[in-house]
Image: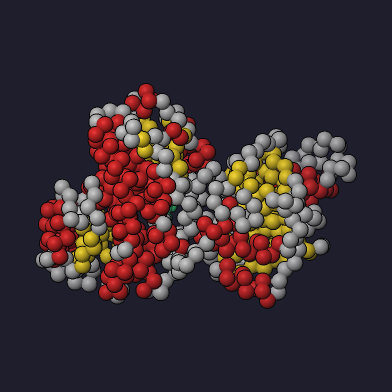
Amino acid sequence: MCGIVGYVGRSEAAPILLDGLRRLEYRGYDSAGIAIVNGDRIETRKCAGRIANLGSLMAENPPAGHFGISHTRWATHGKPTDQNAHPHFDATGKLALVHNGVIENYQALKDQLIRDGDKNFSSDTDTEVLAHLIGKLYEDSATTDTRPDGSAPANGGAPSYSKKARLVDAVRAALRQVIGTYGIALVHRDIPDFIVGARRGSPLVLGVGKNENFLASDVSAIVAHTRDAVYLNDFDVVAVERDRFEISSVAGEAGSYELRKVEFGDTDIKKGDYPHFMLKEIFEQSGSVRDALRGRLSHEECTAKLGGLNMSAAQLRDVGRVVLTGCGTALHAAMVGEYLIEALAQIPTEVEYASEFRHRNSPMTRDTLVFAISQSGETADTLGALRESKRKGYRTLGICNNVASTIARESDGGVYMHAGPEIGVAATKSFTSQVTILTAIGLLLGRMRHLSPAQGTGIIETLEALPGQIDQVLKLSDQTKAIAKKYASVNGMLFFGRQFNFPVALEAALKMKEITYLFAEGHPSAELKHGIIALVRSDLPSVFIAPDDAVFSKNVNNIEQVRARKGPVIAVTSGEGVGKLKKIADDVIEIPVAPECVTPILSVIPLQLLAYHLAVELGLDVDKPRNLAKSVTVE
Ligand code: F6R
């Protein structure tokens, strides 16, 4: 949700910033901009639309300079216009700022600035208000020789109270007035080779190079230049120069930091031979599921080993209730998790929309274990839910992909997905990794209770067979492409499944909506007759996820109900279901036979492919769907 890149070093800043923005484009793509300080002027280019537009603008008139900031936007306040694109400037035009987040009290701050005589606003954004506030505090401190909070600087305002220190103080003083979230980076025309960054609620990473340093919303923007990173914490303020940086807090205290090595490299964030990231990530799933399990299954003890949970055997045995929370695709994985944990461990499990959970007073038992599930580890609602359950004293664990993300750092423990970067805006491999990990958690909790060693071994073998079965499912790509072509002119699609595969119906419908913009809904198959059947007609296909399992015959009944009303049917099935459904469905997609608890991992993949191929057939931008952004760091 908005991407920020900053650079200070000896190289030309423009290509580094533009390349970084391209890698962050998944975070927002309705406008983009850049500000580079070149001697005594700030060169700015910004425009509505994709980063390609900004690239053309910069190619026509390349900005020069060795330090600067840049931004790709997902609009919150103000339409995606040239004017509202970041960077924004203070009233003097000397300070440029980029921002990811929401300044909730921007109107009150703006009113005060206007009362103080500032009439120079040129956009509708909350960000511009922050730029003006910091600029005003900086300018005021120059004329009064006091710190922006009114106190005298340590040296009594002598010349050594440098512009750099004054700017950092101004940033701190402004942020103390802000209600809301921010990841920011700013430069000042009069302060060479100097960038200030700060974060609260929106991610910001410092990339540490040799004679050059970087700021970015996500390491993927800078991994081509350095793999040494400092993940900033909330309320950190960082002053960045070419060969040094200093971290302090908004309150003015000296900060500490940990330098970490980024796990992945530049090639991991490239499309390679694939036309889209989404297709690449769909095809990575046998590897990502294998990586989710690597070192986590013990044949000897017939269970899963998840040391990152930081829980003793006794603590695991005492878990009396599980809450799984997340948003979007992660929530759908959580719904599969509910079936899994209840089936394998017989622990009452509930799924909560993070956005609802965080604001309601859900009754919880003392022995409740909360899992916050998030690919990015930065989703504002999931983070809010995590903080609320931690505040109430519940043990709260994370299932995240992004190492050192805020959710991963703030939880009491957890399990990393190790799925590698997911760049396509529509989540694919993160879903199957999340479900895989939830199966391992079900196995672990089950083996603390009634699951026998033989049953544990059975589940381990099932999990170990998955990567090979996923490779088989990926061979269905051409078939799903043909089905996509056949239904390219439909106006919508319905998705149905039962038990473990009901959440797959929801996830498949979400994929279809996100990237094809078709109306799509997912439901438990049996709900059909309670109302949805009114929608059935000859130009609205119904997709049934009906593997050959305990509820297969029930699904067949529902398929017949659709057929009787001339609704086309696409069925995803397995084993003996194939022959049976070929007689009644229009199209049958065959997945391998597997125990029902892992079928969601196999059944979702052809439906990811179906949505993908249909979107391509419709000529849509698969990796950057309309209005969406990955990593939703606003509420
Ligand atoms: C769907 C999608 C979103 C995310 C949701 C949560 O394709 O990408 O629904 O699943 O925004 O994101 P994370 O998992 O990063 O918390």
Q: Which residue is drawn at 31% across and 37% down?
A: 442
Q: In this view, does 164 lie above or below 369?
A: below
Q: Which residue is drawn at 41% across and 57% down?
A: 284
Q: In this view, does 174 lie to the left or right of 104?
A: right
Q: In this view, does 468 lie to the left or right of 43?
A: left
The answer to whether residue 105 is visible is no
Whole-percent x, y for residue 131 in the image: 68, 54
Q: Residue at x 69, y 65 (%)?
A: 14
Q: In this view, does 437 lie above or below 494?
A: above
Whole-percent x, y for residue 572 in the image: 23, 59
Q: Is residue 551 left or right of residue 144?
A: left
Q: Which of 159 and 562 is in front in this view?
A: 562
Residue at the limit of the structure toward the right, as seen here: 159
Q: Nearer the viewer, residue 93 or 488?
A: 488
Residue at the limit of the structure toward the front, as seen here: 300
Q: Quadrant of residue 491?
A: bottom left
Q: Residue at x 48, y 58 (%)?
A: 423
